[in-house]
Amino acid sequence: MAPPDEGERARLAERRAELKDRYVKPIAERPATNGRGIHHAALICSDVEQTIRFYDGLLGFPLVELTENRDYPGSSHFFFDLGNSTLLGFFDFPGLGLQPAEERIGTVQHIAIGVPPDKHAELRAKLDAEGIPYDGPQRGIPESIYLRDPDGIGIELLSDELMYFGGAYLDR
């Protein structure tokens, strides 16, 4: 499928502007959120150890729990510490014959994980040393490293501060 042509892009931009005007409130008028943050995202992996080696061993997000999934006997449920009291969780579902995910409506396109600038540089050097492909800095986006985990899940390592996007703080 081809990206939208110029006319369609203009129509989509106009629609985004309408939605932004209608729903994005100035900070002084914005109600407080009911949330405290994401406790954890729960994803599915094909191989527990491979996933641990990637997130803990390569990216440096410590494994903090590994237990049986309470909803599916025999399945593992495990968590990595992403800092700031947030977790990235995984399940495996042995015996279900699950197929690899495709990018489609309703799926996760990528998960952006904030990392301090010094760790961002260290991770980039580590990826280079390991020969692991990534995108971002090469396209003129120095604050982002986009890569895929062993199951193809999109991960962005982002050196921007939390609640900072597009050159502005979204909470100030």
Image (tube, grey):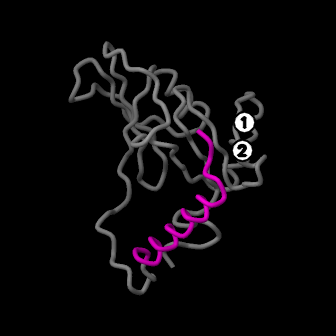
Residue 38 image position (x, y, % from top left) = 38, 54
What main secondary structure does the magenta stretch of the protein show? helix
Height in image: 55 above or below 115? above
Residue at (42% x, 86% y) in the render: 28
Residue 95 shown left or right of residue 172 in the figure: left
User: In the rendered image, which quarter is residue 164 located in?
Assistant: bottom right
Query: On the rendered structure, is 169 left or right of 122?
Result: left
The stretch in magenta equals: 1-24
Q: Quadrant of residue 6?
A: bottom right
Q: According to the image, label 2 marks what residue? A: 122
- Location of mark 1 (residue): 126
- Identify the amino acid type marked 1: Lys
* Dot 2 crowding, Cα within 10 Å, few <14, some 14–19, many 20+: few
Element marked by disc 1:
helix
Residue furthest bottom in the image: 28
Please, what is the three-letter code of the amino acid marked with disc 2?
A: Glu
Q: Residue furthest front?
A: 7
Circles 2 and 1 in contact, beta carbons < 8 Å = yes
